[in-house]
Amino acid sequence: MLITFEGIDGAGKSTQIKKLLAFFAEQQLEVLSLREPGGTEVAEKIREILLESHHEITPIGELLLFSASRIELVQKVIMPALNAGQTVILDRFFDSTTAYQGYGRGIDLEQLHSIISLSTGGLKPDITFYLDLLPEEAMQRKFFASSLPLAFEDERLDRMERSGLDFFKKVRQGYHAIMQSNPERFVALDATEAPDKIHCKIIRILKDRYPG
Ligand SMILES: Nc1ncnc2c1ncn2[C@@H]1O[C@H](COP(=O)(O)OP(=O)(O)OP(=O)(O)O)[C@@H](O)[C@H]1O
Ligand SMILES: [Mg+2]
């Protein structure tokens, strides 16, 4: 089974994945937890270019770099794990590409979808938890610890996060559109709720859908 987590930067994906992993560990269920971009030697190098660098990258270049990282992870790690019957939890997958590079950067969605199918080999999540949060609030969370004023050019943000508020508003609208086209696998969660409350909802939904 493939479980993915989606949402804008700072929505709480890592927080929820950590809680879900602890839950699975308590049940003595073995799962594989991965995050995009990255996960193989080559994919981690691509991650550095995409997130840690100050390079100007064209939207299509960005799409292809994310996709190159993805096919590495899918072919070398995810597919072998799924074929061995393992549950895989993935922090971001191709819905991030549709939301960020499609709706955010404005790449033609039809072209984007053909690149996505090339980079996933048609693999789709069984269930996608989408954490919904206003971009303003998500960015405030990132700055909460330092209590510094919000600034999108801040050096502590990664290359994607420095894209600005308007960009993240488009990304969030993109997620809403994707969710409407994929109601069977998308589960929307209000990310303003307390982390434990969100976690309980996730567990309940998984138990309902996959009893035993
Ligand atoms: N439900 C919540 N309510 C309030 N704060 C939260 C909640 N969930 C997470 N946070 C806090 O918000 C910040 C961002 O959370 P987290 O790192 O889990 O987000 P993320 O979606 O993984 O972000 P990124 O895309 O940048 O990896 C953290 O400081 C975290 O403690
Ligand atoms: Mg995270």
Image: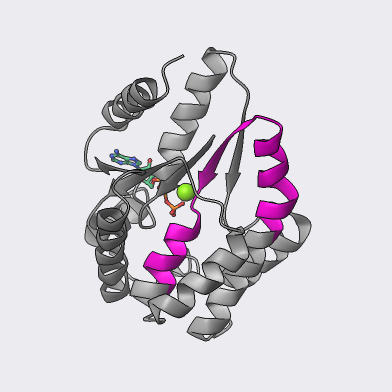
Residue at 54% across, 85% down: 56
Q: Looking at this view, is 49 or 143 the one in front?
A: 49
Dividing the picture into quadrants, the one containing residue 206 is: top left
Whether residue 52 is visible here, answered yes or no, is no
Residue 157, percent from left and from top: 45, 65
- Is residue 80 magenta-colored? yes
Is 205 on the left or on the right of 111, as rendered?
left
Residue at 66% across, 61% down: 71
Residue at 26% across, 27% down: 197
- Is residue 63 magenta-colored? no
Q: Is residue 91 above or below residue 46?
A: above
The quarter of the rendered structure image containing the N terminus is top right
The magenta stretch spans which residues? 72-101
Q: Looking at this view, is 22 or 101 the one in front?
A: 101
Whether residue 70 is visible here, answered yes or no, is yes
Q: Is residue 50 above or below residue 59?
A: above
